[in-house]
Amino acid sequence: MTSRRVRSVALMLVGAFLLAIWTVPILLAVVTSLKDEKEVLAYPPTFWFAPTLKSFHAVLFGPTNILGDLVTSLIIAVATTVLTIVIAVPAAYAFARLKLPGRKPLGFYVLATQLVPPIGLIIPYFLILNRIGWMDSYKGLVLIYMTFSLPFAIWLLVSYFEDIPREMEEAALIDRANRWQALWHVVLPQARGAIAVTVIFVFLNAWNEFLFAVVLGGANVRPVTVSMYNYINTEQTQWAQLAAAALMAMLPVIVLGLAAQKHIVNGLTAGAVKGVGRR
Amino acid sequence: MKGAVVLKGVGKAFGETRVLNDVDLDIRPGEFFSLLGPSGSGKTTTLRIIAGLETATEGTVMLSGKDATLLPPGDRDVAMVFQSYALYPHMTVFENIAFPLRMIRTPAAEIAAAVRAAAARVRIDHLLERRPGQLSGGQQQRCALARAIVRKPALFLLDEPLSNLDAKLRVETRVELKRLQRSLDVTAVYVTHDQEEAMSLSDRMAVFMDGRIVQTGSPEEVFSRPATVQVAAFLGNPPMNVLPARLSAGKAVVGSTTLDLPRFGTLGEREVVLGIRPSGVTLGSAGVPATVTLCEVLGEDVILDLDLGGLLLRVKNPGRKRIPEGERVLARIDPERLHVFDRASGARLD
């Protein structure tokens, strides 16, 4: 074997090992969800068993089903994503292009919000939402999620916008476009990859969020991350149903990930090399 | 008046840094006018002020007879070709050329006809469906030109449009550019640091140094009577020889040599810089003794570096034959072709 082949085989083995680490929990969840509750607790664990969809039936159609909570999660995640993008895109453009007074300190402030550990904000947020009467509501949770997603999205997008050559917009301005038209026709189409990446990150964060949802929501507005918690209680843990619920909660994220795969890869590398493919 | 550009006392500062001082320009309609200068001399800033991409800190800009000092770029009826071409990478060539027309809501049928006509003029009408990334450098440049001419602007601004092309293509495109400008009968303002480009293209040109215009005139005027020693040293290839000398009573002392210059007898006694183009020096049986330190054969021309008592004197084309380095020669400086500049200010004296 040539050294190049050895190298590629070694790389493949390392890749397979890392992939295994990543996939073991998911595979375990798949296996667990297909067992019945008794089988899950069998010791030693069984590898050959009669698979059943009972748990999926229970989490989707049973008395404690999570369908409504999935919808709740979807509403919150979509609302957070849409609002964040609508505000973050023009904000990031302004940071990247306009000569605003206080641009630097503002930029730092945006980033500084990411330095605060979320747990430290729970009580202030609780008090604020309680005072304005937004506790346990969609708007309350979306607002709280945006306090994290908005700075993150702006920060992510600014670097992409800065990479788009200024001359391209200047050409548009000379060609009689106004600033909005230049943004719409020239800048945004080139930032598509970056926006796709931002959408996914923001959506994922909102979809996966548990801490704020359990403290600031949970009764009227209960995202799926919180409702999964109900399969764990003091008497027993319903492992099979918990695994089935977790898999159902993963589904939309996987679909989104697959749909946007191309954009993610393009978007992640777009900022890496200045000007490549843009001129 | 359409296409006339008048700048009066234009200056520009970026914060504390002054990049442009007291620029006056009067560009006539239909003229091909170059802004020539080394990098950082303010020529691109001047062009951007004409385009409206920068606002002058002081002074006025008049375009086609109207005050345009504060007008946004879109309202100036100008088109610009950028050094990087600034094509829109996500649009096809057709869409790129159509963009200026789409922005003024031209009907689709008219756009299609105008785009085809503009593309045909620069011979890229077979590439309309491609994206800029699929074009060669020369084709991208043509696409940028087509986008500029499609809406028939009053003024055509070009910011070093040939600098990204290879040497051969650059010379070809230069000729076409001039032909295009003539056939469209449009005013063109052309920024370049390449003196050969400016000389060959321009009707008139302005030479920029350190944020000021030091000379304006036709290429012939500027070349044959440079206003300052800096302009003299910037123009020509190889550039003019500059020799510090002491002038007194019609004689100039250059190093250990004395030249008879009755023509400059009226200038009195002073410290000067003498300028002589490399083609103004010949080798022969009489003249100043010098040593050959370098001999470059460039096809048609031979360039010799001579050591003239510690001063460098470049000579162009002395008989087209190689002369071994180290050989002693006699150099004759043609006094009729000497330029004389003040040592302190650099200004022309004759």
Image: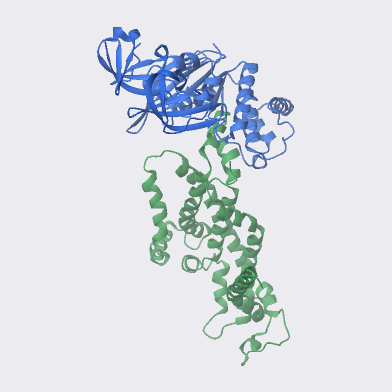
Chain colours: A green, B blue
Location of residue A116 with respect to B132 vertically, above or below:
below
Looking at the picture, does residue B5 appear above or below residue B55?
Answer: above
**Viewer-side residue, B222 vs A160:** B222
Q: Nearer the viewer, residue B158 or B210?
A: B210
A125 to the left or right of A164: left
Determine if residue B238 is in view.
yes
Looking at this rendering, what residue extends furthest in the bottom direction? A43
Q: Which x, y percent locates residue B293?
A: 41, 33
Tell me the quarter of the picture where residue A246 sits. Answer: bottom right
User: What is the tally of numbered marks visible in this picture?
Assistant: 0
* Placement of the N terminus of chain A among the 4 image quadrants: bottom right
Name the residue rendered at 59%, 44% in the picture: A190
Residue B337 spot, x, y in % from top left? 42, 14
Q: Can see residue B59?
A: no
Q: Which quarter of the image is occupied by the C terminus of chain A?
A: top right
User: Does A207 sit above or below residue B231?
Assistant: below
Residue pushed farthest left? B269
Say left or right for A79 vs B312.
right
In screen coordinates, is B39 left or right of A53?
A: left
In front of the other: A177 or B197: B197
Residue at horizontal 59 percent and vertical 39 percent from the top: A186
Q: Position of residue A175 (x, y in %)?
A: 58, 29
Q: Position of residue A9 (x, y in %)?
A: 64, 72
